[in-house]
Image (spheres, grey):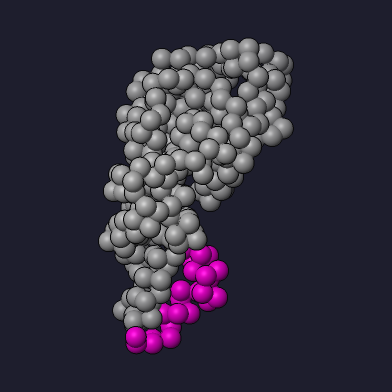
Amino acid sequence: MEEVNELSRASGREGEYHQLSKGRITDRWRRLSLGEFMLSSHSMDKRIHGHLSPSRGYVAMAVMPPPYYMLVDGRMFGSGQVLVLDANSQRDFVNLGKTACYTLIVPESVIVASGQALFPRMRMNAGLASILAVPSSGWSRLHGEATGLLRNGHVSHEDLSHLLSRFLCLMAGEPERHHEKESLCNRSTAHVARCAQEYIEDHYSHTIRLEDLCRYTGVSLRTLQRSFSRYYQVSPVEYLRVRRLHAARQALLCGNPSQHKVSRIALENGFTHLGRFSVCYREHFGESPKETLARQVKV
């Protein structure tokens, strides 16, 4: 158990695990860190008790993929739920055999600031130590995004910001059926969408978080996403990705293979992971970035 506890502390958790069943534990940990953010996954195959909390000043948000589940203070936690813990809420965890869990740990100050930007009417101090039952569609998107990031083995500030926004969206607890009834607060759909597009156009080569777009447009995340999708027929995140791809393509077409590198062009246009950029580029344009650069076409 010493190794398990050491890995747990390295993953931003305070407290200890104790093995309840016999036999050697098989545990697997994976961590992706960026600044003060940490996304991790861990799995164990024995009955284990842990008395745990995030480190002081941090909040942990977790999901558990099916078919696994565990007990948290005697309550069932599993698929379709989100677990939220702050540093003041040390809890008792009991793994009932084989389990797996994905956890995002971020500073509490970031949670509060992001929550205020994305969901101005959300009370962030309420329920920071709870198990939340959430809509299956939102949970599936959150679980899929976390799985994808851990599988890729690379995260950017935007990746973590988008993942955090998905957690906050579920924590806000606004039912999907109410989306269409939200008021735009005297801001037309076109105005909100154009403001967001303007911000993307001016900053696409830099990190852009959904919180940035919400602050710039002055609306909540739901209003931003609904307005932008109605006006442009794509989400803000997808629009940003496509804008960067086209900017990179223009640079590649104007480049000289002997003087320019694909990696440099990708970084200059907001992409932080070369492998992911190459895959997205080929899917979008039907050829690799290197093939485009090799053309030496001047536009």
Residue 93 lies within the magenta run: no
Q: Residue furthest front?
A: 186
Q: Nearer the viewer, residue 66 or 225?
A: 225
Q: Residue at x 40, y 29 (%)?
A: 122
Q: Nearer the viewer, residue 75 or 8?
A: 75
Q: What x and y, as percent, mark residue 131?
A: 56, 22
Q: Residue at x 45, y 15 (%)?
A: 89
Q: Nearer the viewer, residue 107 or 137?
A: 137
Vertical side of 78 occupied by 114: above or below? below
Segment colored magenta? 276-299
Q: What x and y, as percent, mark residue 271?
A: 39, 60
Vertical side of 36 occupied by 258: above or below? below
Q: What x and y, as percent, mark residue 43?
A: 62, 31
> Which quadrant does the N terminus fall into?
top right
Q: Residue at x 71, y 23 (%)?
A: 97
Q: Within the image, what quadrant is residue 3 found in?
A: top right
Vertical side of 154 occupied by 142: above or below? above
Vertical side of 128 occupied by 65: above or below? below
Q: What x and y, as percent, mark residue 218?
A: 31, 44
Q: From where the camera sits, is residue 121 visible?
A: yes
Q: Within the image, what quadrant is residue 17 found in?
A: top right
Q: Residue at x 33, y 46 (%)?
A: 186
